[in-house]
Structure formats: structure tokens, C-alpha cells
Image: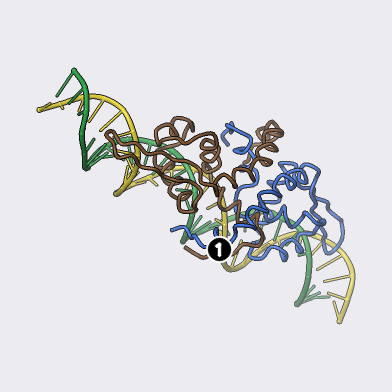
Chain colours: A blue, B brown, C green, D yellow
Amino acid sequence: MKKRTYNCGLDAAVDVVGGKWKALILWALHREALRFGELKRSISGISEKMLIQQLREMEAYGLVHREVYHQVPPKVEYSLTEFGQSLNAALIPLGDWGEKHMETIEAIPRD
Amino acid sequence: MKKRTYNCGLDAAVDVVGGKWKALILWALHREALRFGELKRSISGISEKMLIQQLREMEAYGLVHREVYHQVPPKVEYSLTEFGQSLNAALIPLGDWGEKHMETIEAIPRD
DNA sequence: CTCCATGCTTACGAAAAGGTGAGTACCTGA
DNA sequence: TCAGGTACTCACCTTTTCGTAAGCATGGAG
């Protein structure tokens, strides 16, 4: 893909956390490590394809750690790395903002 | 469009600030009010279509204020509302995070 | 020998987002 | 009369994202 150059840190950060699911995944892993199935159940509406796709990207970014247990049935646990935790920390004010103004945001549909 | 319900504030906030340009526009208006042409020149690579589209959405969200001066040639100034400024404030930690880790982020292309 | 659960992977297509380039309306100054 | 600057608006197309549904490998339980 095209090499991205960012104009400011915000630009870069939004690129990392953008999309429909990454913030949710980050949030879900905030408390504890979860396995694939647990993650899927805890994020309502996500498909397996999207979940894996996002997890893979986040793994590539070094945000999440993937731990495979060679068992049957298989078990794979996902957890936040320190990098992921630092991102989560940076997102807290934004989360608070969203929480505070959620009614306003929901009230203005697009289109 | 479909009514969105958010699972957490972060979800809602990312929805507001998501996309390729909104964060940049917010950032550009952080310092001072700018007119259309100035905004366009200060955000490299944006097309007129995108700029207006995003500005209109942000206006609908109550993030930016649009002031028309009835002159010839026309002059329209965009500025942040208090709501927009509060969002910008909530984005600062994220911007710092992005700034700090920009090299890491740029180094991992997707695809 | 078949079924089950888990954690994926793949193919297909719809929908949304983004980009390009042309055109409009207005008055001013040459 | 005619080009110029400003702020859009529109039609059309490409790219990216998202969703749906199916299939695969493993080994233990029945």
C-alpha cells in the first residue's frame, strides 16, 4: 500500500484506531485477556471475519499479543501489549467525551 | 441512515472523529477561524468536495460554526464551537500518543 | 464412525467512503 | 465584454470497508 505520511500525531492515531471495530476491541481487552470466542461474544454484532481482520492488524501494529495454546479444542488468547495499553490510556479522555455527549451524538443521524 | 447505538463513549467519539479528514480539519481550526480557501490550502491533499462534505457534517454535529459574509467575492469563515473545542481538548492525549509513536505507526504498512 | 467445539479462512457482493473534473453564480476591475 | 476570484455543486467512477455464508482441521466424546 501507499506509504502514509501524517501531518500531525492526531492524524496517525485516528488512522490506527479508526474503523468500526478497533476501539471496541481495545476496550474489551482493557480489563483482561480474552480468547477469540469470548471476544466475539463480548462485542455484539461483530462477525468472525471482521474480528480476525482487526485483531491481525492490531497485532501487526504491536497493540495486541496473541497467545496460542496447543489444545483440542484450540484456545487462543488475546491481550493488550504495553503499547496497546498506552493507546488505551490516551483514548480515555475521548471515551469520556463520547460518554458525556452521547445523546447529542446519537440524536444527529447522518443522511 | 440507521440509528446507531453505541456500546461505549469511545465508540461514539470515534464515529464522530472518524474518516480521513475530520481530525485534520478540527486541528486546523484549533488555532483560529479560517475561510474555505484557507482551510483548503492548509490541509494538503484534500479536495473541495471532501472539505465541504466534512464541514457540513461537522456543522450538523454542532462542532463547527459557519459564518457567511455577504461580499463579493464571497467570504465564509469556519470556526470551532465550544463543543468542537471540547472535542479537540479530548483529542490532545491521542494526538500526543500519535506524535510519540509516529515512527512505529508509519513503519507498519497495511496490506 | 459421526458429531461437536474452537479458531480460523475464503469467496462473493453490497455499501460506504473517497477522488476527479467540470460547471455555476456573483460582482469587480481592466 | 471578458477574465478572475470565491465558494460551492454535481455527475461519475474507483477504492476501501463491511457483511454473509460456507468450508476446513483437530481430536475427544458418544
Q: Which residue is mark 1?
A: B4
Question: Looking at the image, which is closer to me, B63 or B2?
Answer: B63
Mark 1: few/some/many CA within 10 Å (<14, 14-19, 20+)? few
Nearest to the observer: residue D17 or residue A106: A106
Q: Is residue A9 left or right of residue B58?
A: right
What amino acid type is highlighted by mark number 1?
Answer: Arg
Q: Residue at x 83, y 51 (%)?
A: A67
Q: Is residue A29 left or right of residue B25?
A: right
Q: Position of residue D4 (x, y in %)?
A: 26, 25
x and y, in percent, of residue C1 in the image: 79, 75
Q: B75 or B2, which is in the foreground? A: B75
Residue B102 lies, with reference to residue D3, above or below; the image says below
Badge 1 element = loop
Q: Quadrant of the C terminus of chain A?
A: bottom left
Which chain does the residue under circle 1 lie in?
B
Residue B23 location, quadrant:
top right
Tell me what residue is drawn at x 76 percent, y 43 percent.
A86
Residue D6: image x %, image y %?
Answer: 34, 33
Q: Quadrant of residue A60?
A: top right
The N terminus of chain A: image quadrant: top right
Q: State the residue at coordinates (47%, 41%).
A: B79
How many marks the image carries: the answer is 1
On the rendered structure, is C10 left or right of B59? right
User: Which picture quadrant has residue B73?
Assistant: top left
A44 lies above or below B110: below
Identified at 71% across, 41% down, the residue is: A61
Residue A8 place in picture, x, y as percent: 60, 33
